Amino acid sequence: PAAIKKLFAVKTRPLDQPVSALFPSIEEAKKYVEWNDRAEGLAQSHLPGPLTLILPLRKNAPPIFPTPHPYLSPSPNLAIRLSSHPLAMELATRFGKPLSTTSANLHGKPNPYTAQEIERQFAPALMQPDLILDGGNLPATPPSTIIDLTQRDETRTRRQGNLSVDSDPP
């Protein structure tokens, strides 16, 4: 709980804007969310990669990220990610549990693509990240496409990134 609270404080992220969970594999993600055929199709076609899937949490899911504030209700859904970046996947694999994940910027600021850009962006901030891992210079790309699969008969694109999933089978 303290780490989640600090993540929101460091990023100055609104408390009602949840973070996604980084998993090392689809099999691990399935332990936490109610998987369906649409999720399976999208995952097989696009994961690991720039896709985030929002699915309902399983009733028997292991405990996941607490809310960043005691007055907020826990979300019944979870946004899952499988990164294509080797460092992110190594962290997720070694940790063995979902990692809270979000871009490495201050809320509302541009996405940084180097460790030096992160340092510059946070330099004037009151709260600082505890650690910055240098994963090398990343290509400047849009954020992941976010697909909401929480409604049984509805698929909604919450954020359009470079990945288009409109032509994928239901």
Image (cartoon, rainbow, N blue to C red):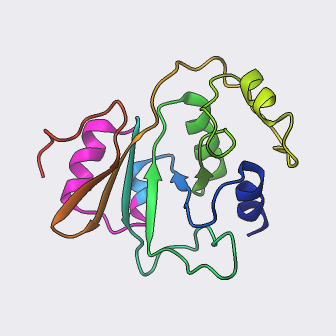
Q: Residue at x 55, y 77 (%)?
A: 74
What is the quadrant of the N terminus in the image? Answer: bottom right
Q: Is residue 15 left or right of residue 75?
A: right
Residue 6's quadrant in the figure? bottom right
Query: Residue at (45%, 64%) from the top-left corner?
Result: 78
Magenta residues span: 30-48
| Total marks in image | 0
Pick whichever, 8 or 124, lies toward us: 124
Left or right for 88, reference 117: left
The residue at the point 82 percent across, 39 percent down is 131
Query: Was residue 46 drawn as part of the magenta stretch in this picture?
Result: yes
Question: In the shown orientation, is residue 123 left or right of residue 68?
Answer: right
115 w.r.t. 169: above or below: above
Against 43, is 117 above or below?
Answer: above
Counting from the top left corner in percent of width and height, residue 90 is at 60, 37
Residue 66 in the image: x percent, y percent?
Answer: 64, 72
The picture places residue 69, in percent across and down from the top left corner, at: 69, 74
> Magenta includes 151?
no
